Amino acid sequence: MRKPFIAGNWKMHKTVAEAVDFAKRLREAAARLTDRDVLIAPPFTALYAVAEVLKGSGIHVAAQNLHESRQGAFTGEVSGPMIAEAGCDYVLVGHSERRTLFGEDDALIARKIEAALECGLKVIFCIGETLQEREAGLTAGVVERQIKEGLKALRNDDIKQLVIAYEPVWAIGTGKTATPGQAEEVHAVIRTLAGRLFGEAAADSLPILYGGSVKPDNMAELMAEKNVDGGLIGGASLDFDSFFRMVMFDRKD
Ligand code: PEP
């Protein structure tokens, strides 16, 4: 069975001191939770310090990006082995901000996913359509293309190292959330496609997260959908109490 997976993407927010403070509170509050996966993705500068705090807690740490090469003359870039050594077990690839603001296309994203898997990192692979694509009825086709192109180099077993985050671009940071029904419709398309590409068993255990203006108030209704296994949360993950409410969306304690 798939466990709920609650992930916070901090983007370019929090100093090392702020990130460590948050991580200490999270460790205190969430280390005992074994019935769900909890992850935070701090900026590069805070990864090592946060990973040290969370070591042994079962709480995951992700980088928000990686370079597709292991090393080289790429000023300003950070590679997969560096991220793994800093203590991360996950990396985000294909976030819509990387696609739109930094020109990352499906081919580059495929190379980054390959690079991440090669150095033992698990991948949260982000996909999703723009408003224009949704209004033109292209949503299913867009996510299908992103998955087929992005996961080109994947071997059958690699799928176990993967989490997919469906994040409609029109919902990210806009306050406009997809309805649970809209999310479920696309998540079902993704799971069916994953079944065709990687087999039913692999598709069945693939965590598919929804992202796009998830907040404490809409988390539970999204999570009630059959194929929504968790949330990738940006803005609402920055405040500890807000994030923790979403981590605990279905628990009374
Ligand atoms: C994100 O950055 O992945 C995201 C979904 O952001 P927000 O929750 O702020 O919409």
Image: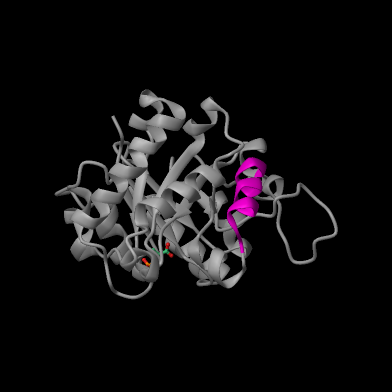
Q: Nearer the viewer, residue 12 or 180?
A: 180
Q: Residue at x 49, y 50 (%)?
A: 146
Looking at the image, which residue is at 66% across and 36% down? Answer: 118
Q: Residue furthest right?
A: 73
Tell which quarter ligand 1 is in.
Answer: bottom left
> Which residue ends up furthest to the bottom in the rendered image?
174
Q: Position of residue 81 (x, y in %)?
A: 70, 45
Residue 84 percent across, percent down from the top left: 64, 44
The foreground one among 152 and 208 is: 152
Residue 182 pos. (x, y %): 23, 57
Query: Which residue is most to the front?
Result: 136
137 magenta-colored: no
Locate residue 138, reporting x and y percent.
37, 58
Q: Residue visible at 84% across and 54% down?
A: 72
User: Does 59 sit left or right of 221 as displayed?
Assistant: right
Figure check: 117 above or below 110: above
Q: Residue 111 in magenta?
A: yes
In the picture, which quadrant includes the N terminus?
top left
Segment colored magenta: 104-115
Judged from this view, the residue extending furthest toward the left is 252
Camera sees residue 222: yes
Residue 238 seen anywhere in this rendered image of the structure: no
Locate residue 65: give its quadrant.
bottom right
